[in-house]
Image (cartoon, coloured by chain):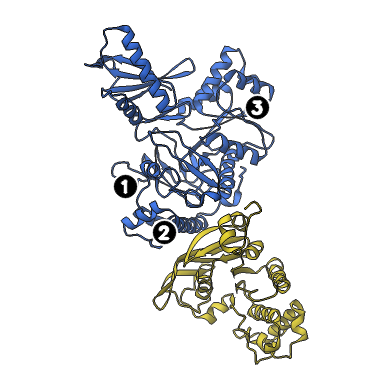
Amino acid sequence: MTYFEPILETMPRKELDVLRLERLQSTLNRAYLNVAHYRRAFDSVNILPEDIRSIDDLESLPFTTRDDVEANYPYDMFAVPLREVVRMHSPSAKSSKPVVTGYTKNDLVHWAKLVARYMVAAGVTKDDVVQVAFRYGLLSGGFGMHAAAELVGASVIPTGVGNTAEQIMIMQDYLTTVLVCTPRYALVIMDGMKQKQVNPKALRLRIGVMGGEPLSHELRQEIESGLGIEVFDNYGSSVVIGPGIAGECQAHQGLHVYEDYFIAEVIDPYSLKRLEPGERGELVITTLAREAYPLIRYRTGDITSVMKDKCPCGRTHMRLSGFYGRVDNSFKVKGVMVSPNRIEEILAEQGIDTKFQARVYTSGAREIIEVLLEVKEGLFFDEMRAQETFIERIERAMHAGLGVRVKVRIVPAKAFVGKGVVVDERL
Amino acid sequence: MLVVSNLHTYYGRIHALKGISLHMKPMEVVALIGGNGAGKSTVLKSISGIVRSASGSITLNGDDITHVSPEKIVMSGVSHVPEGRRIFPRLTVEDNLLLGAFTRKDYSEIKKDMARMQELFPVLAKRRKQYAGNLSGGEQQMLAIARGLMSRPMLLLLDEPTMGLAPVVAKDIYRQIRYLNKERGLGILIVEQNARVALGLADRGYIIETGRIVLEGNASELRQSNEIKRAYLGKDYREVWE
């Protein structure tokens, strides 16, 4: 087994906990001194940073929610002056309100190291050719993976997402060995290969570095057998830092949370009580060394469970068992987060208050989102033409508001599939 | 080897340390950086038992030394070189050194150590019969460190060792400190207002502000932090482009 930062990754539990407490306390002190939101939050429960004397005491502090982060847009959650910030990213819009996060020089160094731990755990070396088919830009995924692969010393191809034909050509010609993409984009690539009659087994590909959305057992198997690679899952959150919060090792028994850098808790999203290992609930993250953008008990909305048993790989950091969707039913398409609440908002902006259902399915390798609107008075058109214009208007508004294209249909209520607001029919 | 957790210390009603946690591994050099009155010296005094802490704990190699007497702490391997040297001006250099070994009874070994100190700091050999008060500032600092070493510590607490010294003398002191760590395997916890120098010497650092640790990290990373540069590398510090 190889590690990128062996001392930190295999640190005896006792030492690790000493380090974690120190870092937690300095994070709380900085957040309290420099971020008005945290000062208000601590004051509201009458707690000073020094009242947190152990990692368990963290439980007495209030959560930070996406709403808090949005309410402090753009810079009020930053713990350093803007002149110390050298990079900014923005997570995909889950609501109409944007979010921006910042990184200091040290944050970028730490971030690259965290993702590099995961890549090295997956077996990536300096001899690899790494094709980063993650979105570059405001989303943090592409840059995070890119910096880490360079740090490991691999040859990095920053293809970004999309243009599948070219991706496949590059994969063949540049002798790509590691593919970095979302699991669903791997399916698109597989489909593209089928169409072009490219035999994936004839390529040099050996490792899939995946993340950005939940990876089910079936999906993993399909990609592994389809591309002839070993797939490694990783967890990230653009609000927290990007990729590199947790990553799988070669034991494939869950994702190690880099505990010297994060505290991960899993809570019941309704009672807000901490759950035991093995129990599924919402992941809550506290950063331990983030300078520009410390987060304290941030509710990620992602569903997972904790595993505290020993991992054969030798890492002492606990694991998350995997990811099982979102607490609020939102889902990711083409790397963009779509939430049913946001769909409802857009419909309301358009003066529509009918019941709806979002259906996600694949046609070939393409992912399609369909928003079904229940037909009712006021949503009924005698003229075909008028209905088409109406639907076009809604689709445009959805595209603008969600960042992805959506098909809109008006249907009788009985055409809804089941009862959920979201029906994900993908793998 | 040293673990300080949740340390609270008061001077009368002044809450000087508000929950300090820090650790040191064997043979590590750790810098405590902060402005005047931040609590840096109080941390050292709390560790060496000179100041009693109200709550929290200090363990050395697993043993609780929180409320142990200063001389017992010296015997367990911690030596404190206080701010402003605090040598005995009316005693000779030699007698000052001997006082550093007051917890020891192995007289023949003490004698050997006296010789070693004079080897380590040749200027002390030259002046061993002189009153310590007649030494220059730099020489007094060397004497203070040498006296600290006479108890054969594994951990040296250094409080502002170069305060008031000419830069060239300060450089010499730092060279000695580096030697003690690298060649003698001494762990060193150093308090400094001059962050640039301290972080140049240390493996890791903690930044203290009004009794709280606000940042912890590798010295190389802390040197990168513009916040620290501005706050502790001197008022006039400016990046080239500013």
Chain B colour is yellow
The residue that label 1 is drawn on is A273
Secondary structure beneath dot 2 equals loop
Against A309, residue A185 (above or below) is above
Whole-percent x, y for residue A190 in the image: 55, 19
The residue to which callout 2 is attached is A54
Q: Which residue lies furthest to the left in this view?
A: A377
Residue named by callout 3: A176
Chain letter, disc 3 residue? A
- How crowded is the residue under tag 3: few (<14 C-alpha within 10 Å), some, or many (20+)? many
Vertical comparison of A282 with B222: above or below: above
For chain A, the rendered hue is: blue
Is disc 1 on the same chain as disc 3?
A: yes
Q: Is residue A348 left or right of residue B236?
A: left
Circle 1 marks a residue in which chain? A
Amino acid at circle 3? Thr
Neighbor class of circle 1 (other Cα within 10 Å; few <14, some 14-19, many 20+) is: few
A398 and A322: which is toward the camera = A398
The type of residue carrying mark 2 is Ser
